[in-house]
């Protein structure tokens, strides 16, 4: 049986993978409806949030457990700030330096945020 912290980490990684799946579906839909540039733009926008989110989940749940509340809370808050800053930097770099459709990048980014919250809510409501 996995340790309690391991179960939480596994659930968190599954949530990020579901988030990525939603981004891919959106990208394919936009590709089919509006072309390659829109599909790739949405994928990049989604990845600008999904990749930092994956790194956040990986790092926060790597060394901390729910039992070490203060250590966990500190790691969580620092990780969240880092995730948001990295995500914003990636978003700006994508829009500034790549030939993308800004509205599709923004759509992918917002969808990634919403997907994570919806998946998180569904996961928490099942327990």
Image (tube, rainbow, N blue to C red):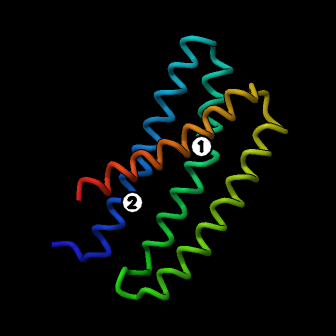
User: Closer to us: mark 1 or mark 2?
Assistant: 2
Q: Residue at x 51, y 57 (%)?
A: 54
Q: Secondary structure at mark 2?
A: helix
Quadrant where the C terminus sits is: bottom left
Q: Between residues 8 and 110, which one lies in front from this camera angle?
A: 110
> Residue, x 69% and y 58% (percent of image)?
86
What percent of the width, then of the height, locates residue 57?
Answer: 48, 64
Mark 1 surroundings within 10 Å by alpha-carbon count, few (fewer than 14), some (14 through 19), many (20 or more): many
Name the residue furthest left.
1
Number of the label disc, if any, that sits on residue 86: none
> Which residue is the site of mark 2?
12
Classify mark 1: helix, strand or loop: helix
Q: Position of residue 44 (x, y in %)?
A: 64, 37
In the drawing, does residue 123 fall left or right of residue 52? left
Indicate the quadrant where residue 3 lies.
bottom left
Tell me residue 70's x, y (percent): 48, 88
Note whether 73 is above or below 19 in the view shown.
Answer: below
Q: Which mark is residue 47?
A: 1
Q: Distance of mark 1 from mark 2, alpha carbons?
A: 17 Å
Q: Image height check: is 75 above or below 46?
A: below
Residue at screen point 47% across, 48% down: 116
Question: To which quarter of the image does residue 66 belong?
Answer: bottom left
In the figure, is residue 54 to the left or right of 10? right
**Residue drawn at x 79%, y 45% as measured from the top left:** 93
Rendered-image quadrant of the N terminus: bottom left
């Amino acid at each position: 049986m996995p340790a309690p912290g391991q179960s939480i980490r596994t659930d968190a990684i599954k949530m990020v993978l579901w988030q990525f799946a939603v981004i891919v579906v959106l990208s394919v839909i936009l590709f089919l409806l509006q072309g390659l540039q829109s599909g790739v733009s949405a994928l990049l926008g989604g990845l600008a949030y999904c990749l930092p989110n994956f790194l956040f989940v990986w790092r926060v749940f790597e060394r901390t457990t729910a039992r070490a509340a203060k250590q966990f809370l500190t790691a969580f808050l620092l990780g969240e700030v880092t995730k948001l800053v990295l995500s914003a930097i990636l978003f700006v770099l994508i829009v500034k330096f790549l030939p993308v459709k800004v509205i599709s990048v923004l759509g992918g980014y917002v969808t990634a945020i919403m997907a994570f919250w919806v998946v998180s809510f569904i996961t928490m409501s099942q327990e």
